[in-house]
Image: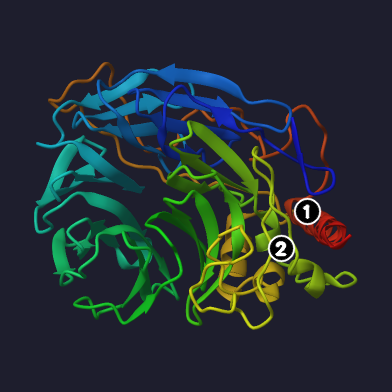
């Protein structure tokens, strides 16, 4: 059992037998699944007391490059370099369907929106599948190199796809057509997410540059932000102005967009490249996976503390947060007050080389963007507890592809739930009557106190 900050607990790292290519959190239970180079998909129930393997699935013959739970958590989907897509019951681990030759080339990325599954392969082909009947409803081949990442915008019914050919593809999920593809940016695009009320798409590149596309202006980026010393292979949305990036230097950074600033560091995997970072449904933990064979958990709940409460010298304390140990944990500190290390290269000169260009932003730690707060309220009940929603889908028919069993609706609600009523991320075996909001406030206070003591000890 690992311990961080003061007495705040978090799950130990999970060590796999081979490099981990992908990870995904269950939407409404303390469960995480990993996709591994050795062609296995492992499922764990995580907790502060212990991590327990629930399933170890062998559904592919080559590297598993992506895993994703359905929106209701009932089905676990995985894709592989062998060009297959596999579907398993997340409760029992049993195979419910498999598409053997889903693409002509190895699969590289996937995303899920309602009953739709979106896949991209090594040659730039994007396919959209209707999981109700397991049929491919659209195929696009406008991009020329592997599809590295997807970002779905549900209310606009659009999915963005980044490609190693340096282009951003814009696909219409309602009309099933391609809206646009950007001009080549001269740099492989490896990751993406959508911010600013869906008006901006942020893309990470091979050279460590962040490129920003404005909605409707798809030919060229409208802004670029340097600062990462190596490639930006993965990223996640934090709030309307802020993202987390995972780089091949092994470091997870907090980045603000417009104004552009590197705010801080969540953690790192030494010098091992990061393959994936994901955020738990209750935003309490972030998980990262790397070539070091570890899946590490990081406490990030304090970043979403919605009450904006100050305690003592909180503004000063926030500038001196701490880094968690090898098992995961907190966030590392800051640069000078001017937001620079003195030589404008975005890389600290104190030996930590975290590539930070700015102190930890108090506003990020203490105030949620109004949109983010509304999203939180929409996803939680009146007591502040996380409440996952299920998207029911019509019954499906059996397709002609390989299937070990039939399912009335793959991505619809079912009786399997990994234990109904379980609060995501709750400590295993320990009673905790605090609401989610109270737990986040307590986490924040502990991180402030411990961060101050760590900083003062460094001055001795």
- Give the spatial CA distance, label 1 vs label 2: 9 Å
Q: Is residue 331 visible?
A: yes
* Quarter location, residue 121: top left
Q: Position of residue 408 (x, y in %)?
A: 32, 29
Q: Residue at x 68, y 46 (%)?
A: 329
Judged left or right of residue 458, residue 2 is left
Q: Residue at x 51, y 73 (%)?
A: 241
Judged left or right of residue 66, residue 354 is right
Along the viewing direction, whichever of 95 and 394 lies nearer the viewer: 95
Q: Which mark is residue 305?
A: 2
Q: Quarter holding the N terminus?
A: top right
Return the residue at label 1: 443
User: Crowdedness of circle 2 by 10 Å Cα count: few (<14), some, many (20+)?
Assistant: many
Residues under numbered marks 1 and 2 in contact, where contact means CB atoms less than 8 Å apart: yes
Secondary structure type for disc 2: loop
Q: Quarter holding the C terminus?
A: bottom right
Q: Position of residue 171 (x, y in %)?
A: 20, 62
Q: Position of residue 337 (x, y in %)?
A: 69, 80
Q: Is residue 115 visible?
A: no
- In this rendering, the count of numbered labels is 2
Along the viewing direction, whichever of 15 and 30 lies nearer the viewer: 15
- First-in-chain label (1 vs 2): 2
Q: Position of residue 191 (x, y in %)?
A: 35, 57
Along the viewing direction, whichever of 249 and 152 lies nearer the viewer: 249
Q: Residue at x 37, y 75 (%)?
A: 200
Q: Residue at x 40, y 58 (%)?
A: 230
Is 197 drawn above or below residue 456 in the view shown? Answer: below
């Amino acid at each position: 059992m690992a311990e961080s900050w003061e007495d705040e607990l978090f799950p130990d790292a999970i060590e796999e037998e081979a490099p981990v290519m992908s990870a995904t959190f269950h939407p409404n239970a303390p469960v995480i699944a990993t996709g591994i180079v050795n062609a296995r998909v492992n499922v764990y129930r995580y907790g502060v007391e212990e991590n327990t393997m629930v399933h170890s699935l062998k559904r592919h013959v080559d590297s598993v490059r992506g895993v994703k739970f359905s929106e209701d958590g009932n089905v676990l989907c995985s894709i592989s370099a062998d060009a297959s897509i596999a579907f398993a019951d997340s409760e029992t681990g049993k195979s419910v369907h498999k598409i053997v030759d889903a693409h002509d080339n190895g699969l590289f990325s996937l995303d899920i929106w309602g009953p739709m599954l979106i896949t991209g392969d090594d040659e730039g082909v994007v396919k959209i599948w209707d999981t109700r009947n397991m049929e491919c409803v659209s195929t696009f081949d406008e991009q020329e190199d592997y599809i590295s990442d997807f970002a779905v915008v549900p209310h606009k019914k659009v999915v963005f796809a980044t490609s190693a050919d340096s282009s951003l593809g814009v696909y219409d999920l309602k009309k099933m057509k391609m809206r646009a593809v950007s001009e080549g940016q001269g740099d492989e695009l490896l990751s993406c997410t959508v911010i600013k009320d869906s008006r901006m798409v942020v893309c990470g590149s091979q050279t460590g540059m962040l490129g920003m596309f404005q909605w409707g202006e798809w030919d060229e980026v409208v802004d670029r932000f340097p600062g990462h010393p190596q490639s930006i292979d993965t990223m996640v949305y934090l709030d309307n102005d802020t993202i987390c990036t995972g780089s091949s230097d092994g470091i997870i950074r907090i980045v603000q967009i417009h104004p552009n600033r590197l705010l801080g560091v969540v953690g790192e995997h030494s010098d091992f490249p990061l393959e994936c970072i994901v955020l738990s449904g209750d935003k309490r933990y972030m998980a990262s996976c790397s070539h070091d064979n570890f899946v590490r958990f990081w406490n990030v709940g304090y970043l979403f503390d919605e009450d904006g409460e100050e305690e003592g010298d909180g503004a000063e304390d926030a500038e001196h947060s701490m880094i968690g140990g090898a098992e995961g944990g907190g966030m590392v500190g800051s640069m000078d007050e001017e937001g620079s290390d003195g030589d404008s290269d975005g890389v600290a000169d104190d030996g930590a080389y975290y590539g930070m260009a700015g102190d930890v932003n108090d506003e990020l730690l203490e105030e949620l963007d109004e949109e983010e707060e509304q999203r939180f309220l929409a996803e939680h009940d009146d007591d502040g507890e996380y409440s996952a929603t299920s998207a029911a889908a019509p019954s499906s028919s059996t397709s002609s592809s390989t299937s070990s069993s039939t399912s009335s609706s793959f991505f619809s609600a079912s009786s399997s739930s990994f234990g109904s009523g379980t609060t995501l991320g709750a400590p295993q075996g320990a009673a905790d009557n605090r609401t989610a909001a109270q737990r986040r406030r307590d986490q924040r206070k502990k991180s402030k106190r411990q961060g101050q003591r760590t900083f003062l000890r460094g001055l001795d």
